[in-house]
Image: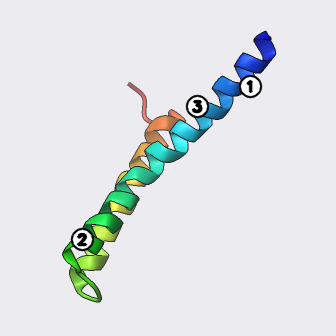
């Protein structure tokens, strides 16, 4: 029973990390879809900002930033 709980917690923890990393990109895509911004230079700016936020979260989760 203890191994099953550890396996379930590991899977849930991995899912939480993936969702946490992908959230900025998904928010940018939803925001662009709501406001209908397509093909403009601002689309690329917002996507780069979302990508940068995701990379920062990945680095923060990975422990490369010392507290």
Which comes sooner in the sequence, label 2 or label 1? 1
Which residue is found at the position 24% from the left and 84% from the top?
41
Q: Is mark 3 on a helix, strand or loop?
A: helix
Could you tell me if residue 52 is visible in this image? no
Q: In which quarter of the image is the C terminus?
A: top left
When asked about the image quadrant of residue 24, the answer is bottom left
Q: Which residue lies furthest to the top in this view?
A: 2
Q: Which residue is at the front of the view, 48 or 22? A: 22
Which residue is found at the position 48% from the left and 46% from the top?
19
When asked about the image quadrant of residue 4, the answer is top right
Please state which of the two labelled residues, at mark 2 or mark 1, is closer to the viewer. 2
Q: What element carries label 2?
A: helix
Which comes sooner in the sequence, label 3 or label 1? 1
- Label 3 – label 1 distance at C-alpha: 10 Å
Residue picked out by circle 3: 13
- Residue 7's disc is 1
């Amino acid at each position: 029973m203890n191994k099953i709980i550890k396996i379930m917690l590991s899977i849930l923890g991995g899912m939480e990390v993936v969702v946490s990393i992908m959230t900025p990109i998904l928010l940018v895509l939803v925001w662009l879809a709501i406001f209908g911004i397509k093909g403009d230079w601002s689309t690329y700016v917002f996507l780069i900002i979302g990508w940068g936020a995701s990379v920062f979260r990945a680095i923060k989760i990975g422990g490369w930033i010392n507290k």
